[in-house]
Amino acid sequence: MADQMEFDQSKDHIGGNFEWDVAPNCCALLKVAVEDEKFIFVSNFASDGNNSFYMMPVTSEGYFARDNGVAISHCPWCGTKIVGRKKYTAKST
Ligand SMILES: [Zn+2]
Protein backbone atom coordinates (compact mmCIF):
# COMPACT_ATOMS: atom_id res chain seq x y z
CA MET A 1 0.00 0.00 0.00
CA ALA A 2 2.62 2.49 1.07
CA ASP A 3 4.63 2.09 -2.09
CA GLN A 4 1.71 2.98 -4.28
CA MET A 5 1.97 6.55 -5.48
CA GLU A 6 -0.71 8.13 -7.54
CA PHE A 7 -1.36 11.62 -8.74
CA ASP A 8 -3.66 13.51 -6.44
CA GLN A 9 -4.99 15.15 -9.55
CA SER A 10 -6.76 12.00 -10.59
CA LYS A 11 -9.50 12.31 -8.05
CA ASP A 12 -10.17 16.00 -8.42
CA HIS A 13 -9.37 16.62 -12.02
CA ILE A 14 -10.63 14.74 -14.98
CA GLY A 15 -9.05 15.46 -18.28
CA GLY A 16 -11.21 14.76 -21.25
CA ASN A 17 -13.00 11.85 -19.61
CA PHE A 18 -16.33 13.49 -19.02
CA GLU A 19 -19.23 15.02 -20.84
CA TRP A 20 -20.10 18.67 -20.83
CA ASP A 21 -23.31 19.91 -19.41
CA VAL A 22 -22.32 23.35 -20.59
CA ALA A 23 -19.30 23.33 -22.86
CA PRO A 24 -17.08 26.40 -22.98
CA ASN A 25 -17.90 28.09 -26.22
CA CYS A 26 -15.67 31.15 -26.21
CA CYS A 27 -13.35 29.70 -28.83
CA ALA A 28 -12.26 26.36 -30.20
CA LEU A 29 -8.83 26.47 -28.56
CA LEU A 30 -10.09 26.14 -25.01
CA LYS A 31 -12.17 23.08 -25.72
CA VAL A 32 -9.29 21.47 -27.59
CA ALA A 33 -6.95 22.20 -24.67
CA VAL A 34 -9.29 20.36 -22.31
CA GLU A 35 -10.41 17.49 -24.47
CA ASP A 36 -7.45 16.75 -26.70
CA GLU A 37 -4.32 18.42 -25.34
CA LYS A 38 -5.09 17.58 -21.68
CA PHE A 39 -3.48 20.85 -20.79
CA ILE A 40 -6.43 22.55 -19.19
CA PHE A 41 -8.20 20.55 -16.52
CA VAL A 42 -11.68 20.98 -15.16
CA SER A 43 -11.99 20.61 -11.42
CA ASN A 44 -14.95 18.94 -9.78
CA PHE A 45 -15.18 22.02 -7.63
CA ALA A 46 -17.86 24.31 -8.89
CA SER A 47 -19.03 27.75 -7.87
CA ASP A 48 -21.96 29.64 -9.27
CA GLY A 49 -22.75 26.65 -11.42
CA ASN A 50 -19.41 26.78 -13.18
CA ASN A 51 -16.66 24.24 -12.71
CA SER A 52 -13.24 25.66 -11.94
CA PHE A 53 -10.70 25.43 -14.72
CA TYR A 54 -7.00 24.84 -14.12
CA MET A 55 -3.97 25.10 -16.28
CA MET A 56 -1.42 22.37 -15.57
CA PRO A 57 2.01 23.18 -16.99
CA VAL A 58 3.77 20.07 -18.20
CA THR A 59 7.51 19.67 -18.56
CA SER A 60 9.11 18.44 -21.74
CA GLU A 61 9.25 14.97 -20.21
CA GLY A 62 5.51 14.98 -19.77
CA TYR A 63 5.42 15.37 -15.99
CA PHE A 64 3.43 18.04 -14.28
CA ALA A 65 5.75 20.96 -13.69
CA ARG A 66 4.08 21.90 -10.47
CA ASP A 67 1.96 20.28 -7.79
CA ASN A 68 -1.01 22.50 -8.21
CA GLY A 69 -2.72 23.82 -11.25
CA VAL A 70 -3.10 27.48 -11.90
CA ALA A 71 -6.73 28.41 -11.61
CA ILE A 72 -7.95 30.36 -14.57
CA SER A 73 -11.20 32.21 -14.82
CA HIS A 74 -10.67 33.66 -18.26
CA CYS A 75 -9.70 31.90 -21.44
CA PRO A 76 -5.94 32.30 -22.04
CA TRP A 77 -6.49 32.58 -25.77
CA CYS A 78 -9.42 34.88 -26.27
CA GLY A 79 -9.76 36.45 -22.82
CA THR A 80 -13.42 35.62 -22.42
CA LYS A 81 -14.70 34.59 -19.00
CA ILE A 82 -14.85 30.82 -18.98
CA VAL A 83 -18.28 29.31 -18.61
CA GLY A 84 -18.29 25.55 -18.44
CA ARG A 85 -19.96 22.86 -16.48
CA LYS A 86 -19.47 19.15 -16.28
CA LYS A 87 -22.33 16.79 -16.71
CA TYR A 88 -22.65 14.53 -13.69
CA THR A 89 -24.16 11.14 -13.79
CA ALA A 90 -26.86 10.27 -11.29
CA LYS A 91 -24.47 8.46 -8.99
CA SER A 92 -22.56 11.62 -8.09
CA THR A 93 -25.30 12.87 -5.85
ZN1 LIG B 1 -11.44 31.23 -25.63
Image: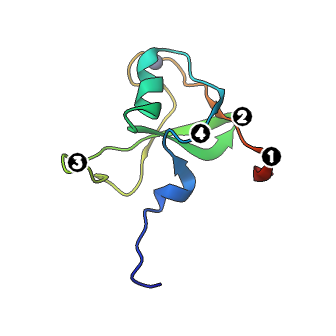
Left or right: residue 82 versus residue 32 is right
Q: Does the numbered disc 3 mark a residue whose Cβ is under 8 Å from ligand 1?
A: no
| x 37%, y 34%: residue | 37
Mark 1 and 2 residues: CB-CB less than 8 Å, in contact? no
Residue under numbered circle 4: 18
Residue under numbered circle 3: 59
Residue type of the residue flagged with mark 2:
Asp
**Whole-Å distance between the Cαs marked 2 and 4?**
20 Å
- The foreground one among 20 and 70 is 20
**Whole-Å distance between the Cαs marked 1 and 3?**
36 Å
Label 3, secondary structure: give it: loop
Mark 3 and 4 residues: CB-CB less than 8 Å, in contact? no
Residue type of the residue flagged with mark 1:
Ala
Residue under numbered circle 1: 90
| x 69%, y 36%: residue | 87
Label 1, secondary structure: give it: helix
Mark 1 and 3 residues: CB-CB less than 8 Å, in contact? no
Q: Which of the two marks, 1 or 2, is nearer to us in this view?
A: 1
Q: Residue furthest left?
A: 60
The first of marks 2 and 4 along the sequence is 4
